[in-house]
Image (tube, helix red, strand yellow):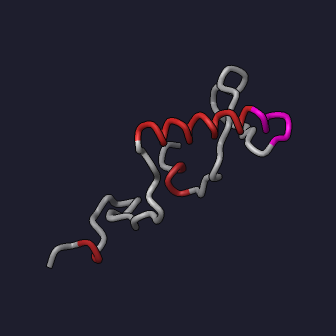
Amino acid sequence: DQQSCFQIPRQEVELYDVEADPHELNNLAGNPQYQEVQQELRTALEQWQEVTHDRLPRARRPDEFDRETGQQLPAFRKK
């Protein structure tokens, strides 16, 4: 169900073995066995962000459109 990724809160960190778990059902993030892999990936991401100047915003903007209907939310409509 594609829309569930918008409705069900997801974990902040996700790590999957896409060969053993192609449907990404078993999140390995937080599993001590994969802690080193997770740290390597985090370091690689941070280095890439530094090189490309691609940082996440400090605060997320609120959604401008309703997730179910796709209609623009009243707070964002031009008067």
User: Residue 45 location, x and y as percent?
Assistant: 56, 38
Query: Which residue is most to the left?
Result: 79
* Vertical side of 10 occupied by 27: above or below: above
Residue 32 magenta-drawn? yes
User: Residue 49 location, x and y as percent?
Assistant: 48, 41
Which stretch is magenta? 31-36
Which residue does the image show at 65% across and 52% down from the upper left? Answer: 11
In the figure, residue 75 lies in which quadrant? Answer: bottom left
Which residue does the image show at 26% across and 72% down from the upper left? Answer: 76
User: Residue 8 location, x and y as percent?
Assistant: 58, 56
Describe residue 16's horizontal placement relative to residue 2 as left or right. Answer: right
Main secondary structure of the magenta stretch: helix
Nearest the viewer among 16 and 23 is: 16
Q: Give the number of callouts.
A: 0
Nearest the viewer among 57 and 65 is: 57
Nearest the viewer among 31 and 4 is: 31
Which residue does the image show at 40% across and 67% down from the upper left? Answer: 62
